[in-house]
Image (tube, grey):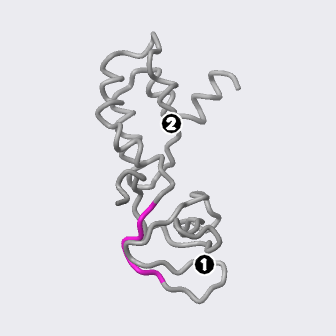
């Protein structure tokens, strides 16, 4: 993939390599609100000669938020009951793993119960909140 295509498909990479701190913050904000899906590998940014120190500081400042945004582990914030066989009943405070954030039905994700991969299905994104494994006690 050439650099031009990479910039089109990966705006987070573009913002970092252009040292556009405002864009980095905006993209993190959009990802936090589930407007976009953030793609990120820390190794792509650390120790790169063309990345300004202020940009690296933003990365460090938002490290936990970015880690949460990249996590596929979520917690249910409300109960969801369904009668559809392709959907998953979930209970408040239950941990789930999302395997598809880009379902055809906007506002829905596909995943399974963290403690049982066999129980899987669709559930509404508004009923879940991202978290990281270290937060699970």
Q: Quadrant of the N terminus?
A: top right
Q: Picture coordinates of residue 105 (x, y %)?
A: 61, 68
Q: Residue at x 60, y 78 (%)?
A: 87
* Residue 46 image point, x, y percent: 44, 21
Label 1: how many Cα within 10 Å (few below 14, some 14–19, many 20+): many
Q: Residue furthest top?
A: 49
Residue 115 horizontal side relative to residue 69, left or right: right
Q: Does 76 appear in magenta? A: yes
Separation of disc 2 and disc 1 at Cα? 29 Å
Q: Which residue is mark 2?
A: 40
Quadrant for residue 66, please give it.
top left
Whether tag 2 and tag 1 are in contact, CB under 8 A, the answer is no
User: Is residue 33 placed above or below 112 in the rendered structure?
Assistant: above
Rendered image: mark on residue 38: none
2 or 1: tag closer to the N-terminus: 2
Q: Is residue 49 left or right of residue 106?
A: left
Q: Is residue 61 left or right of residue 89?
A: left
Q: For the point 47% across and 30% down, which residue is it?
A: 42
Q: Nearer the viewer, residue 93 or 36?
A: 93
Q: Which residue carries the number 1 mark? A: 87
Is disc 2 placed on a helix, strand or loop? Answer: loop
Q: Secondary structure at mark 1?
A: loop
Instruction: Indicate whether residue 3 is drawn in magenta.
Output: no
Front-lying residue, 6 or 88: 88
Residue at image position (49%, 43%) is 38
Read off the magenta span: 74-80
């Amino acid at each position: 993939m050439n650099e031009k295509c990479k910039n089109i498909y990966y705006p987070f990479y573009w913002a970092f390599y252009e040292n556009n701190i405002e864009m980095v913050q905006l993209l993190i904000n959009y990802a936090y609100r589930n407007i976009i899906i953030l793609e990120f590998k820390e190794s792509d940014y650390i120790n790169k000669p063309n990345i300004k120190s202020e940009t690296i500081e933003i990365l460090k400042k938002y490290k936990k938020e970015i880690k949460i945004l990249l996590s596929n582990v979520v917690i249910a914030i409300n109960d969801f009951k369904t009668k559809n066989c392709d959907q998953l009943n979930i209970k408040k405070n239950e941990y789930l793993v999302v395997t598809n954030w880009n379902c055809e039905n906007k506002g829905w994700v596909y995943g399974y119960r963290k403690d049982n991969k066999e129980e899987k299905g669709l559930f509404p994104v508004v009923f879940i909140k991202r978290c990281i494994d270290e937060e699970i006690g």
